[in-house]
Structure formats: C-alpha cells, structure tokens
Amino acid sequence: MFGAGRVVAGRASSGGGKSEGATAIKANAKAGGSVATVAKHAKALNATSKQMLALFPKGSGRGDFSDKQTRALPAVWKD
C-alpha cells in the first residue's frame, strides 16, 4: 500500500497543473491572445494526459484511502 500512498500524495500535489493549463487557454482565448500561447498550454496538457493512467493505479481511491487523501471515485477504474 506504500506505493499507492505515494501515488495518491503525488497526484494530490500535482493536480493544479491540469486546471491551470485549461484556465490559461480560456483566459487567452477571451483576451484575444495568440495561438502560440494556446499551443504551449495545449502541449503541456497533452503531456500530462499521457501520464494519467499511471496516476490512478488500482488501490489508490476512496475505500483504500480516506476522503481527505483522495477524491478518486471507483468509476475511475471502470472500463
């Protein structure tokens, strides 16, 4: 369970990057910003998305950890 605990802690501490990128894209679009800025944030989001499966191994959700440690619901692991 130690390995899953590290994953839970890691995804909790790095979770802001995904929403920050999407927020930056939205703000840039509203302000009429450059396509280059959108592309930069989109590339970062794409790179993060490729790591998503590794951030949610079985045994790292609610039921395995307290609600304070993770908000990952069992639906994450359903096909």
Image (cartoon, helix red, strand yellow):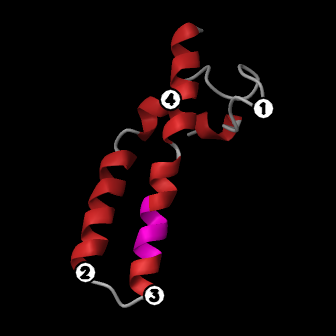
Q: Give the distance between the C-alpha atoms of the residues marked 3 and 2, in whole angstroms.
A: 12 Å
Vertical placement of 59 versus 11: above or below? Answer: above
Q: Give the distance between the C-alpha atoms of the residues marked 1 and 2, in whole angstroms.
A: 39 Å
Q: Is residue 46 left or right of residue 67?
A: left
**Where's the C terminus, which quadrant?**
top right
Which residue is at 36% across, 91% downward? 32
Task: Report which residue position mark 4 lands on.
Answer: 10
Which mark is first along the chain, 4 or 2?
Answer: 4
Vertical placement of 74 versus 57: above or below? Answer: below
Task: Report which residue position mark 1 lands on.
Answer: 67
Task: Report which residue position mark 2 lands on.
Answer: 35
Which residues, given as a range, are shown in magenta?
21-26
Circle 1: residue type: Asp
Which residue is at 71% across, 19% downward? 64
- Tag 1 near tag 2, CB within 8 Å: no
Residue 24 x %, y %: 43, 69
